[in-house]
Amino acid sequence: MKKLIKLIALLMVISLILTGCQSSPVDESTIKVGINMELSGEVASYGQAELNGIKLAIKQVNANGGVLGKEIELIEVDNTSSASEATSVTTRLVSQDNVVAILGPATSGAFKASLPVSEEYGVAIISPSATDTTVMLNDTTKEVFTTGFRTCFIDSFQGVTMANFAYDNLSLSKAVVFGDNSSDYAQGLADSFIAQFKANGGTIVAHENFTKGDTDFNAVLTKIADMDFDVLFVPGYYNEAGLLIKQAREMGLNVPILGADGFESPDLIALAGVDNIVDVFYSTHYSSVGDDQLVADFVTAFSDEYGTEPNAFSALAYDAAMLLVDAIERANDADPSKIIEALLDTDGFVGVAGNISIDNNHDAVKSIYVVELSGDKAINSVKVNP
């Protein structure tokens, strides 16, 4: 009897040891999606706008029953507008939080820095707004990253579009380009604008540069003031562009000022001053000026949720989240590899920022808008198809 009791006790000990050695069960009650976004730092305006778009989309999806019968759980992490931090965030999301896909980062540099990690782990990463033309290419292999996707058009398309818009729509033929030479984004825009403007028969009167963080542009503006030109193209972000517009207008430079989606921020108007926003045009991914019911419904829902109208970054992020949900539904599976396959098969996805098809480079083939700003609001937009 004593031997039997000892045997039973031994078996119980072994059972407890084995139980303790087992891994904790994975929580499969939700589908985890990571958010790697610029929520603080220099371009937090973009990240916060995109976070709001994503959260609205997922709130609506979950309210309608989720996807595959499960709710989506968002895991938000701030990359502090840093490319190196974005890499660390991606590593955490895929290796510790076990997300099935990642939304963000917003900027090209942070997105490109994150792609090698997403590639290593085989998890899709979708940027709403990484527009750098070459961001999808692995610098080492020169091949397209299999895990990277985006819901925005590429920079070269913006530069070409704005060159055509200046020449064809505004009948302008003599341009000064004054852009950020410290940014791949801005340099790509400048190069494609210059090439297309020249191809159209226009003349590039001057090509001047500033550097990220500059606040005083008067020296260059004074230099070009006496030149014969009829349009100023400013490839760069709102931080510098807003101040540049203010100083140009205060100096009496009244030519149309053109930019790209880096202008898309309320801070542009705040920095430039409402009275200085005259004949300002920029390319963007989305416009609420029009009669599209899908867009109208999105604007209403966003305004009700946040008390303000959405900008292009919110719309692109909303589409990125909805595109991911669409891919999971089409895959009928939340397995990361199946999601990647479904994303690559995207054809004609209907979004609030335009219909999206994904090409072999994992780029979004879609429409572009050119918006005219006057004072504190957009007064007109022109839709340009790819």
Image: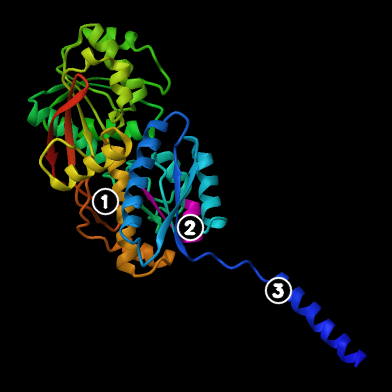
In the displayed structure, does residue 186 sit left or right of residue 3? left
Residue 125 lies within the magenta run: yes
Which of the 4 image quarters holds residue 165?
Answer: top left
> Mark 2 Cα within 10 Å, few/some/many (few <14, many 20+)?
many
Q: Which residue is mark 2?
A: 99
- Image location of residue 344, percent across then percent down: 31, 61
Q: Which residue is mark 3?
A: 19
Q: Nearer the viewer, mark 2 or mark 3?
A: 3
Image mark count: 3
| Disc 3 secondary structure class | helix
Q: Nearer the viewer, mark 1 or mark 2?
A: 2
Contact between marks 2 and 3 (CB within 8 A): the answer is: no
Q: Which residue is mark 1?
A: 364
Q: Is residue 167 above or below residue 30?
A: above
Label located before the other in sequence (2 or 3): 3
Rounded to the nearest angstrom, the CA distance separating label 2 from label 3 is 26 Å
Q: Nearer the viewer, residue 115 or 342?
A: 342
Specify the quadrant that holds the N terminus.
bottom right
Q: Which residue corresponds to the image point at 47% horizontal and 44% vertical from the top-left? A: 113
Colour basis: rainbow
| Residue type, numbered disc 3 | Thr
In the displayed structure, does residue 236 sit left or right of residue 354? right
Rounded to the nearest angstrom, the CA distance separating label 1 from label 3 is 49 Å
**Residue stretch in magenta:** 116-128
Q: Nearer the viewer, residue 47 or 5?
A: 5
